[in-house]
Each structure stands twice: as structure tokens, then as C-alpha cells.
Image (cartoon, rainbow, N blue to C red):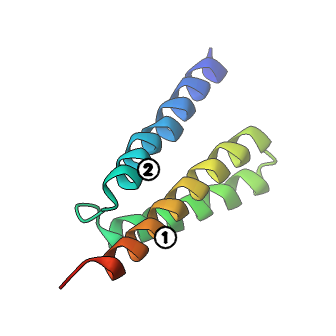
Amino acid sequence: MKSIIATLATLCVVSSYIPQIVKGLKTKSLRDVSLIFLIVIILGTLLWIFYGFLNQDYIFLLANSVILIFAICLTIMKIMYERKRPV
């Protein structure tokens, strides 16, 4: 039962990034997303990855690696789109 809950929670968290990435790609804007938020998410996810590594929980490690990739993508998009925005 615990693994089912963990799997569902992971799917929810991982999939929650997809709409924001798609919207950002379509609108070429992440103006409403805080850069500090993204940096904190990246740092927190790195800590979760380290925790998963220490506990040899490779499913947890994999899930957080995907979250890290999505958060880095959003951060890169945010920086790129902010540079292209007219002042």
C-alpha cells in the first residue's frame, strides 16, 4: 500500500511540471514564475536525490532526478525568456 501511495505521489509531482513547461514553450514567457522559487526547488530536489542515494532508494532517486531535470528546464527557459523580453 505504501508503494502505491508513493508511486501516485511521485506521478503527481512529476507531472505537475509538464503544464508549466508546455505553457512556457507556447507563450515564450515564464514571467509569473519566481526565479528564487525555481532555485529553491532545484536545491531541495538535489537534497532529496542525495537522501535517496544514501538510502539506496533508486526509485526515489530516479523520480527526483526527473523533477530536477524539469526544474532545470524551467529555470533555463525563465532566464532565456527574460533576456529576450523588451525593457
Q: Residue at x 34, y 71 (%)?
A: 35
Q: Position of residue 55 (x, y in %)?
A: 77, 49
Q: CA distance from mark 1 to mark 2?
A: 11 Å
How far across and how far down the image is residue 42, in percent? 51, 65
- For residue 6, which quarter of the picture? top right
Q: Which residue is mark 1?
A: 76
Q: Position of residue 15 (x, y in %)?
A: 49, 36
Task: Return the residue nearer the eye: 75 or 85.
Answer: 85
19 in relation to 51, above or below = above
Is residue 18 toward the left or the right of residue 33 in the image?
right
Question: Which of pointers 1 and 2 lies earlier in the amino acid sequence?
Answer: 2
Residue 81 in the image: state x and y as whole percent. Answer: 36, 71
Q: Locate the N terminus and report the quarter of the image it occupies.
A: top right
Residue drawn 63% across the image and 48% down it: 66
Residue visible at 31% across and 62% down in the picture: 30
SS at mark 2? helix
Q: Which residue is mark 2?
A: 21
In terms of secondary structure, where does tag 1 sit? helix
Dividing the picture into quarters, in which one does residue 24 lie?
bottom left
Give the residue furthest to the bottom. Answer: 87
Q: Residues within 10 Å of mark 1 (few under 14, many from 20)?
A: some
Q: Amino acid at mark 1?
A: Ile
Query: How many numbered circles are shown?
Result: 2
Looking at the image, residue 11 sits to the left or right of residue 3; the answer is left
The amino acid type of the residue labelled 2 equals: Ile
| Residue farthest to the left, as pictured | 87
Question: Does residue 84 appear left or right of residue 17 in this picture?
Answer: left
Q: Residues within 10 Å of mark 2 (few under 14, many from 20)?
A: some
Q: Nearer the viewer, residue 47 or 39?
A: 39
Q: Is residue 29 above or below residue 60?
A: below
The answer to whether 5 is drawn above or below residue 10 in the figure is above
